[in-house]
Amino acid sequence: MQEELETQVDDDQVSLTEEDEVIPFKYSIASYGADYTVDGLVKRMASGDVYVPTFQRGYIWNIKQASRFIESLLLGLPVPGIFLSREEVSKKLLVIDGQQRLRTLQYFYEGIFHHTKKQFALQGVQKRFEGKTYKTLSEEDRRQLDDSVIHATIIKQEEPSEDDSSIYYIFERINTGGTLLQPQEIRSCIYHGPFNELLGKLNQNSAWRSIYGPISKNMRDQELILRFLALNFDLYNYEEPMFKG
């Protein structure tokens, strides 16, 4: 049963660490719940029917955090739900919240932990699961994981009808309520578009990578590129606290 949720967003300024943003809309959002099995979600991730958008932060869990999540499912413990948005034309599901959990499942089923490029074997879990990969789990445990259910809340913005801006504000507010995003991560989620995509491309430049080093999980490298461009094109309009004149 689809329920209509009216979210009133006032004209008050919302603090976003370094900037104040004003949200001038009253959103009308339809939402409904859906339960997905883990193996169903993994298959949808592999096919692209469920995907993580470019505005989201990178994968940041370490092997022990990821292992504990898998262990929770193997033990039959409840895990937090995820938020998805269904695209009007393609009908694909865009991940608003739950990337770390979904990527963890994807990596475990693939067998490779992408941070280290090594085999994804469980660490820091109960003895019966320690060192297990998806393929080496017992049939019973593998079935338990496959059939585990993750609840999803699927939303659709009905008003304003000319954009999908509520997706980005929902993402920003969910994430700033827990582990705080860094300023550039918030900018990336709110100000999506060609310029933000350009920052991502510039960040892959080999010369820049040789100067900065490994890609920053919190987009600090992209923030430096943004600051360079801002200072290059509009130096004299910059004010504190970025620098003191």
Image (tube, helix red, strand yellow):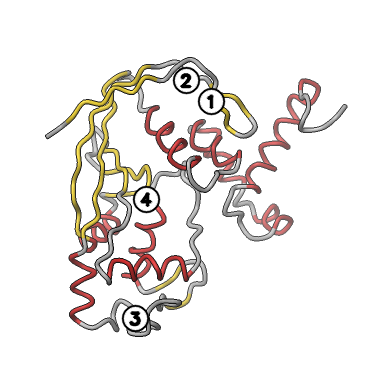
- Report helix, strand or loop for mark 1: strand
Checking the image for residue 98, the label placed there is 4
Q: In which quarter of the image is residue 7?
A: top left
Q: Please report whichever mark, 2 or 4, sits nearer to the chain's N-terminal start.
A: 2
Q: In this view, does 239 lie to the left or right of 55?
A: right
Q: Which of 226 and 198 is in front in this view?
A: 226
Distance from disc 3 to disc 1, alpha carbons, whole Å, reads 44 Å
Residue 139 versus residue 108 in the image, above or below? below
- Report helix, strand or loop for mark 3: loop
Residue 14 versus residue 67 in the image, above or below? above
Q: Read off the residue under disc 2.
A: 23
Distance from disc 2 to disc 4, alpha carbons, whole Å, reads 24 Å
Contact between labelled residues 2 and 3, with CB atoms less than 8 Å apart = no
Q: Please report whichever mark, 2 or 1, sits nearer to the chain's N-terminal start.
A: 1
Distance from disc 2 to disc 1, alpha carbons, whole Å, reads 8 Å
Q: Which of 131 and 90 is in front in this view?
A: 131
